[in-house]
Image: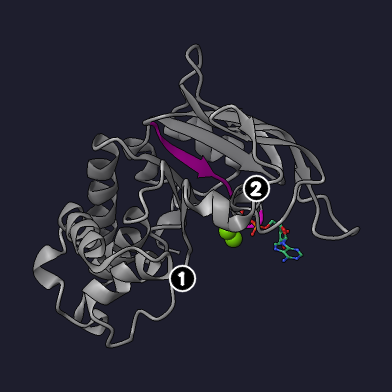
C-alpha cells in the first residue's frame, strides 16, 4: 500500500534557482527508505514540502492516496513525524518523561493517557529506565532517541529523519541505525534523508537518489541499485560519511 507519493513536484524558494524539478516517487507502508544526495541536492526541501512548511510550485503530494495540499502543518504532523537535523534544547535539564510528554500535553491528553503513551514510547526507544533523568545526562545516541520518542508518542504513520547520523562516530551511528531498524520492524515507515550513504544502503529497503534537484535514480523491482551506482549517480564520494 502506498503511504506517501510525490507526483511531479517542482519547487523554488525564489526566482534565482529551481530547487526541485519534476520529482516523483512512491513510498510504501512499512518501508525503510533513504533519500540520498549531495549537499544542496534538495533533500531537506523535500521534507519541508511534505511537512507543509512550503508549498510546491507544481505537482502533488499524496498521503494514503489523498492530496494533502490543503492540510495544515498541524494536521500533517499527526501522521508525519519529522525529526530535524539539529534538535535543540538537548542540553536542558528537562526530565526525559516531560520532554516526551510535551506534545501530548499541548494536545490536551489526560495525565493517565500521557503516562501510558509516554511509557510506551520510552520502552520502544530503550529509554524507560531513564525517564526521570535530565536530557543533559544522556549520550548523543540517547538524545536522538528522545527526539524520536517525542515524535513516536504522537503515533505517526511515517517518520522522516533529516541527516539522523550526521557528524557522529561509528558507535553512535550504529546505535541510531539499529534502533531505526527495530522501529521499522515494529511497523513504522521510515524515511531517512542523508548524504552519508556509506552504511545507509545496508540498512534500507529502497534508495532514492537526488542530484541538483532531480531524481536521478531509484530502486525498483527490475533495478536494484548497488552502493557503487548510488555513489556515482549522486556524485558522492565514498568517504563522505565522516566529513
Ligand atoms: P540538501 O538538504 O540536499 O542539502 P536543501 O534542500 O537544503 O539541500 O537545499 C537545496 C537548495 O535550496 C540549495 O541550493 C540551497 O541553497 C537552497 N535553499 C535551501 N533553503 C533555502 C531557503 N530557505 N531559501 C533559499 N534557498 C534555499
Ligand atoms: Mg544540506
Ligand atoms: Mg539537508
Q: Which residue is mark 1?
A: 86
Front in this rendered view, residue 63 or 34: 63
Range of residues picked out in magenta: 31-40
Q: Give the vertical position of 242 relative to 30 (above or below).
A: below
Residue 22 appears in the figure? no
Specify the quadrant of the image occupied by residue 6. top right
Nearest to viewer (mark 1 / mark 2): 2
Q: Badges 1 and 2: C-beta atoms under 8 Å apart?
A: no
191 left or right of 71 in image: left
**Distance (Cα) linking label 1 and label 2:** 25 Å
Q: Give the vertical position of 69 relative to 145 (above or below).
A: above
Q: Which residue is mark 2?
A: 71
Residue reaching furthest to the bottom: 93
Front in this rendered view, residue 229 or 64: 64
Q: Give the vertical position of 71 relative to 84 (above or below).
A: above
Task: Name the residue located 24 percent from the left edge and 68 percent from the top edge.
Answer: 111
Classed neighbour count for the residue bearing mark 2: other residues with Cα under 10 Å, few (<14), some (14–19), many (≥20): few
Amino acid at each position: 500500500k502506498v503511504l506517501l507519493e510525490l507526483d511531479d513536484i517542482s519547487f523554488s524558494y525564489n526566482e534565482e534557482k529551481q530547487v526541485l524539478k519534476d520529482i516523483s516517487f512512491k513510498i510504501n507502508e512499512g518501508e525503510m527508505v533513504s533519500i540520498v544526495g549531495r549537499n544542496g541536492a534538495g533533500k531537506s526541501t523535500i521534507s519541508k514540502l511534505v511537512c507543509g512548511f512550503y508549498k510546491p510550485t507544481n505537482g502533488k503530494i499524496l498521503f494514503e492516496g489523498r492530496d494533502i495540499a490543503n492540510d495544515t502543518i498541524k494536521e500533517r504532523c499527526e501522521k508525519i513525524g519529522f525529526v530535524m537535523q539539529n534538535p535543540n534544547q538537548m542540553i536542558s535539564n528537562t526530565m526525559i518523561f516531560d520532554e516526551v510528554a510535551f506534545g501530548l500535553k499541548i494536545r490536551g491528553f489526560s495525565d493517565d493517557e500521557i503516562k501510558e503513551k509516554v511509557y510506551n514510547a520510552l520502552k520502544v526507544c530503550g529509554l524507560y529506565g531513564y525517564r526521570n533523568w535530565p536530557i543533559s545526562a544522556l549520550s548523543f545516541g540517547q538524545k536522538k532517541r528522545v527526539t524520536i520518542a517525542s515524535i513516536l508518542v504522537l503515533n505517526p504513520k511515517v517518520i522522516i529523519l533529516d541527516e539522523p547520523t550526521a557528524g557522529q562516530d561509528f558507535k553512535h551511528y550504529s546505535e541510531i541505525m539499529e534502533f531505526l531498524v527495530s522501529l521499522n520492524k515494529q511497523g513504522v515507515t521510515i524515511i531517512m534523508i542523508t548524504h552519508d550513504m556509506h552504511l545507509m544502503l545496508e540498512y534500507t529497503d529502497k534508495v532514492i537518489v537526488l542530484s541538483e534537484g532531480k531524481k536521478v535514480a531509484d530502486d525498483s523491482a527490475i533495478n536494484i541499485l548497488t552502493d557503487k551506482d548510488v555513489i556515482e549517480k549522486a556524485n558522492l564520494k565514498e568517504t563522505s560519511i565522516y566529513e
